Image: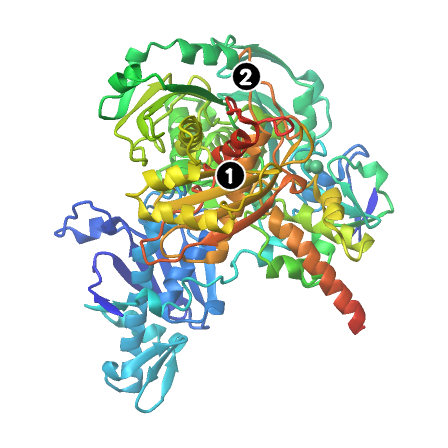
Amino acid sequence: MRSFSPDRRKFLKLSMAAAGSSLILGISWSCTQDTPSNTDNQSDNFSPNAWLRLDPDGSITVIVAESEMGQGPYTLMPMMVAEELEVEWDRIKVEHASLDPVYGYQLTGGSGSIRKGWSTLREAGAVAKELLLGAGALALSVPVIECTARLGKVVHNPSGREVAYNELTDIAAKQPIPGTAQLKEPNEFTIIGQPVPRLDVPEKINGKARFGIDTKLPGMLYATITHCPVFGGKPKSIDASEAKSIKGVKDVFPIDEGVVVVASDTWTAFKAKEVLSIDWEYGNKTRISTESIINQLKARPLEEAQTAWEEGDVETVLSGSNAAVTAEYIQPFQAHVPLEPMNCTAHFKGDGRLEVWAPTQSPSSAYDTAKAIVQSKIERGLKKVQKKLLGIHDDSIDVHTTLLGGGFGRRLKQDYVSEVVQVAQRYEQPVQLVWTREEDVQHDHYHPLTLHKMRGATDENGMLIAWEHIIHGLKVNASGAATLLYDIPNTRVLVQDIGAIVPWGPWRSVAPHYNIFAVEHFFDELARAGNNDPLELRLKLLRDHPRLSKVLEIAADKAKWEARPNGAISYGAAVLSEWGSNVAQIVELAETDNKYFQVKKVTCVIDCGIVINPDIVKQQMEGSIIFGLSAATKSKITINNGRVDQSNYHNYPILGIHETPEIEVIIVNNEEEPGGIGEPGVPPLAPALANAFLSATGKPIRELPINIESG
Amino acid sequence: MQISVNGKIHNVDAGEETPLLWVLRDHLGLTGTKYGCGIGACGSCTVLLEDEPVRACLTLLGEVENKKITTIEGISPESNHPVQQAWEELQVPQCGYCQSGQIISAVALLSETDEPTDEDIDEMMSGILCRCGTYPRIREAIKLAARKISEQRINQ
Ligand code: FES
Ligand code: FES
C-alpha cells in the first residue's frame, strides 16, 4: 500500500437520500492533466467524469463514459475501481454515462481509455473505501485504525465484528473526503491482472444487447438517405413519384448531405431509395481517381515536403554510396465497415427538447453537431423549424450513447447525427435513420492512400548508415516513422501532404498503420541487401529500446525463428512501439504449391505495461491481427470519376474464419504504466507478412493488398 | 399473414416481398437478428427456418408462412444453450453485433454434426463476417459446445 492525498477538487460525493441513501462519488480526471488549476475557484474547476454508486441493496455501479465498441471499457474501467474498493467482482455493475458537461469531453479513441483512467479510477476506488472505513468505524464505535476493508465489508480486526458496505452508504456520504487514502502496490492486486469475464458478454449472446440500430421508440418513423455518388455533390432535382407511390412511404426530400426517404419501416425506406430518380450537381470532384491521386502524389516537388525528423547527413551518405537501395510502396484507401451500419435516432419533443440515441465514439461531438444544426436552421430562418426550436437552450439536447456495433474510428465522425437531426426536426415523432451498407462503403471517411519513397544505404558490413522515408498522402503525418527507433547515424523523414481531397477519417491505428509498413518492410529490404538476418539486425539496432527488443526476442523464441524450416515455411517479423505499448509479430507463411501461399500462424508478443485484463488484451491482439490481415491481403477502396468503386462486402471483402490463421498471443507482464491495446496490434501484421513473402520469393512487396495467391 | 417465430404465432401486416429480416426487426421488434449487408454477404441476419440456417435478408415473408422460424431470442429459455455457454466461457463477443448470426449458425452446425472438424466449421461459418475478429474464439467455442452436447447426451 502507498498513501496519497486525494485532491479534493477531484472528488465529489453526494448522498441521494431520495434513492434510499446511495453513496455517489464523482471523479474528475481533468485535474490529473498538466493544466494549471485555479485553486481559488474550485467549483468551476470541478469536472467529474466517472461516477461510482453504492446502493443500499448492495449493488455497486461504475458509470463509464467511454463508448463500448468491443474493446472492453465496460469491464476494464470498473475493474480499476473495484480493485481499490475491496469488493467482489461479481457485485459490480456497469452503466453508461449520460451526456453531461460534468463528464468533460466524451470521446473514445486513440487507445486512450485505460491510460486516461489508470490513476483516477483507482484513486476513486481508494477514496470510496476510505469513506466506508470511516463510516464503518463510526457504526461499530471503534477506532478506524483497527479496521480493514475486505470483500465489501468493514471488519474490526480485534473483535472480528463486521458491517457491510451497503449498510454504511448513508454515514459514508456524510464523511468529508479523507486527507489521505491508500493505493495498492501491483503485487497486492487481486482483480487487476485477472482474466475476469466481461460485463457485456451475457447480453451479447442472447440478442438482448441494444445497439444504436435497435433503438425502438413509440411512433418512430424510419428514414434512409442516398448521398451523391460523387464526393461533395448535391441534389439538383428529384423525381420521387415512383418512390412515393410505394405504400408506407411518407416523404422524400433533400437535406444538406443527400436525399432522404421517410417511411413506416426500414425496408420500405430502402425500397423507395432504390427507385428515386435524382439529377445530381456533381461538383468539382468528378475527375478524381485512384490513378490521378497517385500521379498527383508522385508529381509533387520534394521542396514542398515538411521535415518531420532529421539527423546526420543523409544526402551526402546516399549520394556517396554505391550500395544505395530504393523502394516505393503504395497502400490503398481503406473503409471501416463496422458490422453495424451507420444509424442514429432523434426526437424533437413537444417542449422543444431534442433527444438523440447515437452509436457514437463521441457523444460530445454528436452533441456539438446536433447543436450546430439546430442553430444554423434558426439562423437561416426556416419558419416552421424556428417555431419549434425557439425553446432550445444548451442543455435541451440530450445524447444517449448506445452500444456500438464496431467503431474502428468511423464513429468519431458524426455525419449520421447531423442527418437525422435535420430529418427529425420536421416531425413530431422520433425518427431513426439507417444507412444501407452500400452508402456506408461509398460514403465513409477513408484511411488515406499513401505512397512511401524510401532510400537507404549499408556499409561494407551490411550495417545501416543512411535512411530516408518520404511519406506522401492525403492528410498524412509521420507518426510511426519519426522518430525512427533504429540506431542509424543518418536519417531523415519527410511528409508530403496533399490534404483530404477525398473524405478522410481516423481508421484503427491511423498513421502508424501506413508508416510502420514502410519502415518495417524497407528494413528487411536493407537487411537483405547487406546480407543480414533481419531479426538479428533489428535486435542489434534496437539496443536502446529494451522493452521493444525484449518482445521481439520472446516472439522469435516462441515462433522458433532460429529453427525455422528451410523452404516450405517462410518467416517475417515486424515491431511497433506506439500508444505506450510495444508489440512484435512474426508471420509464418506456407507455400502450399508453386503459386499458392497461406498464412499459417501469427505469433504476437505485447508489452502494454501493467495488464488490467489479460483476456481482453488477448482479444484485442487477435482482433487487430485479423483486422490487419484483411487490409494486407483482401480489402481496398478504389476511386474512379470521383466515386468509390466498391459497395458492399462482396467487393470490399474482409477476412473470414476460413482465412484466419492460428494466432498465439504472449503478454509480457511488468509494472510499467499501462499502455493502449485497441490499436497497437494492427500495424505490424502487414509488414511481417510482406517480410515473409520477401523471404519466400526474394521479391519485395510494392503495393498492398498482397495477392496471397501469388505474392 | 401469419408466421411462427420462436414458437409464437404472429400476424404480420407486410407485403409478401418483405425480407424476413425486416419483419422480425421492425414489425415484431425482435432486434437480435441484425442487418449487416442486405445481400447475403455478411451472415449477421442468419436465422433458422425449419432448423436450417438461412439469411433473413434474402428470405421473403411469402416463403415462410406456416414454417418454423427460430431467432437468437428463441434458442434457449435462459441463455443456456450449450453454444451460448461455450460462448460465455470462452468470452467470444467483442462488439457483439455479428454474434447472433455466429451463434445461430453454430447451433445449426452442431445439430448436423456431433464432432465438427475444422473443415466443417469453415464450411458453415465462412460466410458469417466479424469485423472485430472473434474467429479464433468462435472455432474453439464450437468445439467446446460440441463436447458439452455430447456430455449432456451421456448424462441423460
Ligand atoms: S444482412 Fe443478411 S447476410 Fe448480411
Ligand atoms: S464481435 Fe464485432 S463484428 Fe463480430
Residue beneath disc 1: A347
Image-based side of A242 in relation to A401, left or right = right
Q: Nearer the viewer, residue A339 or A394?
A: A339
Residue A149 versus residue A93 in the image, above or below: below
Q: Name the residue located 32 percent from the left edge and 91 percent from the top edge.
A: A159
**Amino acid type of disc 1?**
His
Contact, mark 2 vs mark 1 (Cβ under 8 Å) = no
Mark 2, other Cα within 10 Å: few <14 / some 14–19 / many ≥20: many
Front residue of A216 and B53: B53
Left-right relation of A39 to A130: left
User: Residue at horizontal 63%, vertical 55%?
Assistant: A205
Residue lying farthest to the front in this orientation: A460
Q: Residue furthest right?
A: B66
Q: List the residue tagged with mark 2.
A: A639
Residue A2, position in %: x, y?
24, 68
Residue A421: x %, y % from top left? 48, 32
Determine the chain carrying the residue at label 2.
Answer: A
Q: Quadrant of the N terminus of chain A?
A: bottom left
Dividing the picture into quadrants, the one containing residue A658 is: top right
State the separation of the CA atoms marked 2 and 1.
36 Å
Residue at left offset 75%, top offset 51%: B117
Q: Nearer the viewer, residue A358 or A389?
A: A358
Q: Quadrant of the C terminus of chain A?
A: top right
Is A578 on the left or on the right of B125, as rendered? Answer: left
In this picture, is A124 found above or below A370?
Answer: below
Instruction: For mark 1, name the chain.
Output: A
Q: Dot 1: few (<14), some (14–19), or many (≥20) neighbours within 10 Å?
A: many
Rendering quarter of residue A578: top left
